[in-house]
Amino acid sequence: MSTSMIQVRKRQLTVETIHHEGGPVAAVPLRMAAALAVVRNPFAGRYEADLLPFMAELRTLGTELAEELVGVLGKDRVEAYGKAAIVGVNGELEHGAVWHEAGGWAMRAALGEPKAIVPAGKAVANAGYRLMVPLHYIHAAYVRSHFNSMEVGVQDGPRPDEIVFALVMADGGRVHARLGGLRKDQVQVGDGQR
């Protein structure tokens, strides 16, 4: 009988509603949401050559977090996404990199397979560390209005032998985006798609 490598200590869901950034109040406020899980790092304190089983098992957690975000924002409303991992100090950056496939795959599956790569941030840090997660448009990475970020972190994590995994989604671009560039209604194949 095998034991799961994924042991979740706690989960967190954060939703921000942005009405303005100092300019006029938006007719429709921007909503950004982050779903996080604090997970025991099965490789803390040692080198492990094969991280692929951990990455594969994380797909289930990725799916749960992605579906939680879709439930909050609405699948048809999500326009931007990103992912992140904060590895406790007894781990290594590569332990957070397993989230690239597990988290990105899960978000694309939950959103109907958009083509843009999911941007990411990762760090090795102490408990309470805050990380800015990059976001961009789900259908094309070069839509300038959707270049954004959301802060994530957990006050008591990651502990040295833990990892914080995060997924972030938003239902639009920046509230006062006005710097030109490619618009979402102009996207064609090749505009920053995977």
Image: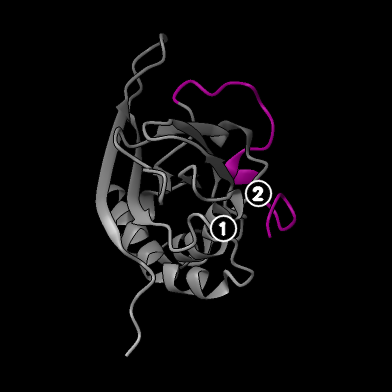
Q: Quadrant of residue 189?
A: bottom right
| Residue 100: assigned label | 1
- Report how many numbered discs are placed on residues in the image: 2
Q: Residue at x 57, y 32 (%)?
A: 145
Q: Check disc 2 and give the amino acid type.
A: Val
Q: Is residue 162 left or right of residue 113?
A: left
Q: In this rendering, does residue 120 appear at all?
A: yes
Q: Amino acid at mark 1?
A: His
Q: Quadrant of the N terminus?
A: bottom left
Q: Relative to the observer, which residue lies in front, 164 or 194?
A: 164
Q: Quadrant of the C terminus?
A: bottom right
Dot 2 or dot 1, earlier in sequence: 1
Q: Secondary structure at mark 2?
A: loop
Q: Is residue 179 left or right of residue 169?
A: right
Q: Farthest residue in the front direction?
A: 45
In the image, residue 165 lies in the stretch drawn in magenta: no
Q: Is residue 68 above or below residue 81?
A: below
Question: Along the line of sight, which residue is nearer the eye, 80 or 12?
Answer: 12
Residue at the far right: name it.
Answer: 190
Image height check: is 89 above or below 113? above
Residue 156 in the image: state x and y as whole percent: 29, 36
Q: Which residue is mark 2?
A: 187
Residue 97: x and y in percent read: 58, 55
Tag 2: Cα neighbours inside 10 Å, few (<14), some, or many (≥20)? some
Indicate the secondary structure of the residue bearing disc 1: helix
Q: Residue at x 63, y 39 (%)?
A: 143
Residue beneath the point at 56% across and 64% down: 101
Range of residues picked out in magenta: 175-194
